[in-house]
Amino acid sequence: MTESVNFERGEMSTNNIASPLISVVIPAYNYAASLARAAQSILGQRDERTELLIVDDGSTDATSEVVKALHLGYPGQFRSIRKDNGGAASARNLGLRESAGDWLVFLDADDEFVPGALGKLAEHIQSNPDSRLVIGEHISVSEEGHRRRHKNDPIPDRGFERVKAYLLDKTLGLSNGACAMHREVFEQGGYPEHFRNSEDLPVFAQALARYPVSTLAEPLLLLYKHGDSLRHHVGHGQAVGTQVVDEVFSRLPAEMQSLRDDFYAQRCLSLFRSAYLAKDREAAKKYYSAALRNNWRLLLKASYTRKAIRLWLGKR
């Protein structure tokens, strides 16, 4: 697809700074209802060290009108781009190319930054010049408004252990908006634009594997949970399937390839679960069988085994 990009007139101000430290990029596709909240959470606290760039990924709702209203309310305080729809990965990659900061924060349009967190992040980066990935904390907000703070566990020193903790053990979590990545991280590759789901996994994995990591014991993000969020879209997950395994491990060093088989099996189990919940029996059977062929010990995972038994007995 040929990419069509539109920088609206008068919106190319770089906040009167030659080179910001942090660029916050908000990719937006049909999030008119929440985009202003996300953008204002940055505009209300940004200073000369930061810039904001909104990338409208060909929205068909009122997103473009929200962006125009934001420009009227905050003249010269941020930039915006409108492009043909290509998915979150393409919007993030465009934001990466068009932003000026050494550090990138990708904030989803349905979330928001915690007040005062941007300054704390900038101070942490300046105090940790060797770091290339900063992992902050986040606060999840349920549909009922309940809040829960998610604190960081200790981060392993070795890249191998960090990748294992992230991909397999699930003891290390990363969320867009709750972490910042230096531009050097993307020398290993940007977001895979042929994915409409799980596009973060290869980028987060390469950052953990190859670069110095630091943690910030402060919540950066309010992460809103809702059922229609694209991050939970079953159809996109099924479309990506196990391709993400090849993508992730094509970016990792040779000494980490030993983790591949276990990650493949785990990915199959995840796809099995999503297909099971979506009542797609054939897809669920396919992924569970693939997981077992890769690692028979998965039979010991009782929760998955119970679902599989119900599936083959025709009870689901």
Image (cartoon, rainbow, N blue to C red):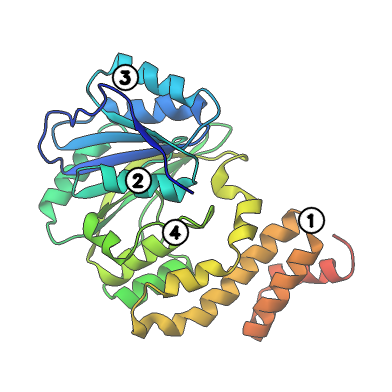
Q: Is residue 295 above or below residue 241?
A: below
Neighbours of disc 2 within 10 Å: few (<14), some (14-19), many (20+): many
Q: Is the C-beta separation of discs 3 and 4 under 8 Å?
A: no
**Label of residue 71 in the image:** 3
Q: Is the C-beta separation of discs 1 and 3 under 8 Å?
A: no
Name the residue carrying label 2: 94
Q: Is residue 110 left or right of residue 267?
A: left
Neighbours of disc 3 within 10 Å: few (<14), some (14-19), many (20+): some
Res 50 quadrant in image: top left
Mark 1 and mark 3: span between their CA atoms? 45 Å
Q: Of the residues shown, which amino acid type is indicated by label 4?
A: Pro
Q: Is residue 190 above or below residue 310?
A: above
Between 266 and 235, the one lying in front of the other is 235
**Residue 276 in view here:** yes
Q: Of the residues shown, which amino acid type is indicated by label 1?
A: Lys
Mark 3 and mark 2: span between their CA atoms? 20 Å
Mark 1 and mark 4: span between their CA atoms? 28 Å
Mark 1 and mark 2: span between their CA atoms? 36 Å
Name the residue carrying label 1: 279
**Earlier residue among tags 1 and 2:** 2
**Earlier residue among tags 1 and 4:** 4
**Label of residue 192 in the image:** 4
Secondary structure under tag 4 reads: loop
